[in-house]
Amino acid sequence: MTKRTGHPPAAGRLMAVLLSVGLVLCAGVPAHARSTGAVSPEIVDSTQRGGAAVALTFDDGPHPDHTPRLLDVLDGHGVRAVFCVMGDHALRHPELVREIVDRGHTLCNHTMSHADVSGWSPERIREELLATNAAIHAAAPDARVRYFRAPYGAWGRSPEVAAELGMRPLGWRVDVADWSTPGTDVLVDRLRAAITPTSVVLLHDGGGDRSQTVAAVDRLVPEMESAGWRFTRPAWGW
Ligand SMILES: [Zn+2]
């Protein structure tokens, strides 16, 4: 007479399958993402704080000339912003990535080389985003990369992938086309006209001559602060 111990064979096989699936799923998610819990894949374009709040975000850097000047301008006004950095630029200017973090700003993943990921598979997007974070962490090992912004706003499947990796997809509500270098006065006028309460604002510190953008920020921030506006970060949420 035999006595059955443990799981019957069918249940044992099922358990083994479930365990191996669980291990595979867990192995695919980096430890830092697992520990932060779920991040929403919804593209955020507003600040956490309500009312007369605005969040400045700067894309395509870091740039060896414009990023340091922008950092000084922001420091001068006590403003913290988000920098959507490209991995290639982070590898070229690691000291600037560290400077961004050391001065209290927040990092955002903007792909390695400004790729249009809208037609890419989730697997390919995931590789690109992980490579970009690796480039950022080579410069600043302990830095959190809280956001992901798709170049050109061409999101495709990237919001879900970014959220799985612990990064909130970061959109914008205000785009004044600073890359077209229309002049500092025009940029300031456009920003004044376009900014509404809780806006995320898209600007650029890389990808070309951004001296007009830096000058416009230097002029606009004190003007808006004295009118009661607060500069803050975009919503993240988890
Ligand atoms: Zn960009």
Image (spheres, helix red, strand yellow):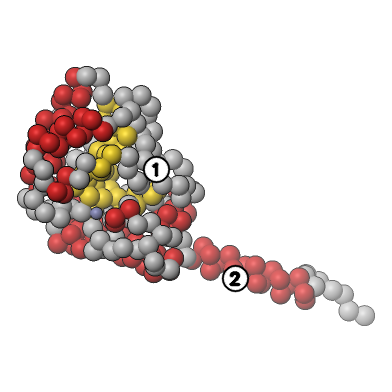
What amino acid is at disc 1?
Val
Which type of secondary structure does the marked residue at label 2 adopt? helix
Please give the label number shown on residue 20.
Answer: 2
Location of residue 139 in the rendering, given as x and y in whole percent from the top left corner: 21, 57
Q: For the view shown, which residue lies furthest in the top direction?
A: 227
Would residue 64 be found to the left or right of residue 23 on screen?
A: left
Would residue 233 be found to the left or right of residue 36 on screen?
A: left
Q: For the view shown, which residue lies furthest in the right direction?
A: 1
Q: Residue at x 16, y 49 (%)?
A: 179
Q: Answer whether labels 2 and 1 touch (C-beta < 8 Å).
A: no
Q: Nearer the viewer, mark 2 or mark 1?
A: 1
Identify whether 232 is placed above or below 32. above
What amino acid is at disc 2?
Ser
- Between 100 and 74, the one lying in front of the other is 74
- Label 1 crowd bin: few (<14), some (14–19), many (20+), radius 10 Å: many
Q: Residue at x 33, y 53 (%)?
A: 153
- Between 17 and 1, the one lying in front of the other is 17
Instruction: Give ligand 1's quarter of the image.
Output: bottom left
Location of residue 160 in the rendering, given as x and y in whole percent from the top left corner: 46, 56
Kindly report the distance in space between the C-alpha atoms of the residues bearing marks 2 and 1: 35 Å
Q: Residue at x 28, y 48 (%)?
A: 107
Identify whether 98 is placed above or below 20. above
Please give the label number shown on residue 81.
Answer: none
For the N terminus, the image quarter is bottom right
Q: Which residue is mark 1?
A: 44
- Label 2 crowd bin: few (<14), some (14–19), many (20+), radius 10 Å: few
Which type of secondary structure does the marked residue at label 1 adopt? loop
- Residue 21 visible in the current orientation: yes
